[in-house]
Image (cartoon, coloured by chain):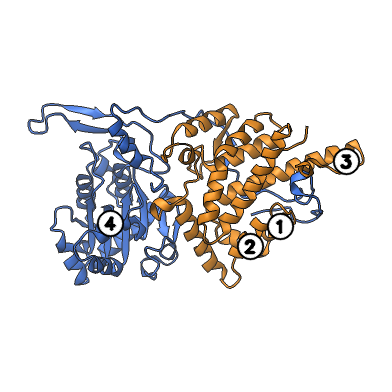
Chain colours: A orange, B blue
């Protein structure tokens, strides 16, 4: 467990810089994961994942041993044998099958309500997250049209709180840790393409890391 | 999608314990959260007088609700002449309501103009409203009769439109409710005829077999999400009572009335359809 708490620095300034870098990395990761689970990648995003900025992003994430298996699964899903159009369509179908309910009851609803109750959407967690968004003076961007307990909304809010070094980040991390691991496990088991299964592995690694830090008494992801 | 790549110092440090590998990367698309311009409601789940009634909300709050207007990818790119092999495969693209309604109105106008209104097969099958205003057959007849783009088939014998489709006379199906392509003794025949149509439009609240096989899917509210009016004594018609909605429309769903009003507007009959009433 200790390895997750180790920062290597020879001076107070270097240590402070590493804390700041760590926080910025976490914010980027959460924003990226929020985008991955919000919608299927469009054509331009698919091209980027294969050969542009997002390809570099995946390569850099893969350098981290905690993420390498998940990233490898995502990269395998970007099948080079398919052209960009075909891959975009395949991922669109996969997203609809997994998260949009098109294929019926086998879908994995990316909502806290679905995992903390009897399977219905728009339950108490939705109202709680709506209240939380009000507290932090944000609303869901108009184009998303999803309830407030959507995974991407919770991750986006957490990224925002961590970026602001807000103490409420810890409570939201605890909230996410209560249902997202189940979501991730289901996603890893059911996603035959592997794109979202890989992202779920990365997300699970982050949640697991934070849980161990909290057990060690850390203030969210930064060692106390 | 991202910007600012370059100069990112790669490092063997773990991202989780203070590595610096990613700090130079940019964001990931538009933000999902924006500064609040208004207060959001904290609407919770409605209370039901009986536990049995709660079953209704299993449907209302089901993960299989249609969330957004969707168009089959090939149809979106190539129109009615697109290949039909991907119908039913789930290859949909989310579009805005404006885009979806423009597509539907243009296609209704095209088919009626080229082949005549008899080539549009429209009807309702299920998802009936608990009130009078949102009765689907009534709304559909009103739209089609005012605009003249189709003869509403709500009251036609179930086999008649399929016979017409078999003869190649039906080019477009506009259906409210979910079972059309599979509701019959000879499902293979119905599916074959469904595949023969140039355009399939389904307006429904859930991903039913018809919605999955459609080219354009329009998400509708359930009765719980819209105001309506009911006649207390149906025979004598002595009084009317309001049926207030219990919850706001979920996701991007709209009432059938709102959808038809928007289509009527695009087909030049908006005022006639709504008579300035919501």
Q: CB under 8 Å between callouts 2 and 1?
A: yes
Q: Position of residue A146 (x, y in %)?
A: 48, 42
Say which residue label 2 marks: A75
Name the mark on residue A14. Answer: 3
Please name which of the two marks, 3 or 4, marks the residue nearer to the observer: 3
- The residue that appears at 10% across and 30% down in the rendered structure is B237
Q: Is residue A152 visible?
A: no
Label 1: state its secondary structure. helix
Separation (CA) of disc 4 from disc 2: 41 Å
Reply above or below: A146 against B174: above
* Nearest to the observer: residue A197 or residue A145: A197
How packed mark 4 is, by other alpha carbons closer than 10 Å (few <14, some 14-19, many 20 or more), is many
Reply above or below: A12 against A143: above
Name the mark on residue A62. Answer: 1
Separation (CA) of disc 3 from disc 4: 66 Å
* Nearest to the observer: residue A133 or residue B208: B208
Say which residue label 4 marks: B174
């Amino acid at each position: 467990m200790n390895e997750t708490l180790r920062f290597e620095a020879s001076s107070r300034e270097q240590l402070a810089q590493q804390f700041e870098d760590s926080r910025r990395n976490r914010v980027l990761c959460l924003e990226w994961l929020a985008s991955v689970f919000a919608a299927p990648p469009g054509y331009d995003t698919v091209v980027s994942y294969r050969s542009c900025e997002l390809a570099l992003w995946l390569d850099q994430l893969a350098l981290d041993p905690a993420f390498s298996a998940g990233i490898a699964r995502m990269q395998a899903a970007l099948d080079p044998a398919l052209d960009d159009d075909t891959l975009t369509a395949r991922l669109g179908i996969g997203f609809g099958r997994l998260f949009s309910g098109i294929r019926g009851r086998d879908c994995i609803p990316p909502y806290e309500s679905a995992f903390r109750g009897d399977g219905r959407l728009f339950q108490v967690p939705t109202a709680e997250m709506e209240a939380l968004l009000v507290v932090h003076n944000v609303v869901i961007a108009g184009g998303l049209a999803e309830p407030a307990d959507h995974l991407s909304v919770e991750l986006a809010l957490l990224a925002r709180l961590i970026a602001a070094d807000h103490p409420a980040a810890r409570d939201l991390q605890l909230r996410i840790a209560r249902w997202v691991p189940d979501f991730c496990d289901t996603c890893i088991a059911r996603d035959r393409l592997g794109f979202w299964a890989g992202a779920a592995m990365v997300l699970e690694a982050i949640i697991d890391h934070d849980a161990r830090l909290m057990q060690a008494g850390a203030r969210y992801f930064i060692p106390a | 999608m991202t910007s600012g790549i370059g100069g990112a110092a790669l490092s063997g440090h773990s991202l989780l314990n203070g590595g610096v590998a990613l700090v130079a990367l940019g964001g990931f698309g538009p933000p999902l959260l924006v500064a609040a311009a208004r207060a959001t409601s904290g609407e919770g789940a409605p209370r039901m007088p009986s536990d049995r009634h709660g079953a209704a909300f299993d449907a209302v709050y089901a993960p299989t609700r249609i969330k957004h207007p969707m168009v089959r990818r090939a149809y979106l790119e190539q129109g009615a002449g697109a290949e039909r092999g991907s119908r039913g495969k789930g290859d949909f693209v989310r579009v805005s309501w404006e885009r979806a309604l423009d597509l539907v109105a243009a296609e209704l106008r095209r088919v009626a103009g080229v082949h005549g209104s008899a080539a549009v097969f429209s009807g309702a099958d299920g998802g009936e409203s608990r009130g009078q205003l949102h009765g689907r057959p009534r709304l559909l007849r009103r739209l089609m009769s005012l605009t003249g783009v189709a003869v509403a088939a709500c009251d036609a014998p179930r086999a008649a439109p399929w016979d017409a489709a078999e003869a190649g006379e039906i080019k477009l199906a506009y259906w409210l409710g979910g079972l059309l392509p599979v509701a019959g003794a000879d499902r293979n025949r119905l599916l074959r005829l469904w595949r023969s149509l140039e355009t399939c439009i389904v307006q429904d609240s859930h991903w039913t077999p018809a919605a999955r096989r459609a080219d354009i899917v329009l998400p509708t509210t359930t009765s719980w999400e819209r105001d309506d009016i009911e006649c207390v004594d149906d025979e004598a018609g002595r009084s009317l009572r309001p049926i207030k909605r219990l919850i706001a429309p979920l996701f991007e769903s709209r009432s059938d009335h709102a959808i038809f009003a928007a289509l009527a507007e695009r087909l030049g009959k908006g005022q006639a359809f709504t008579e300035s009433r919501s």
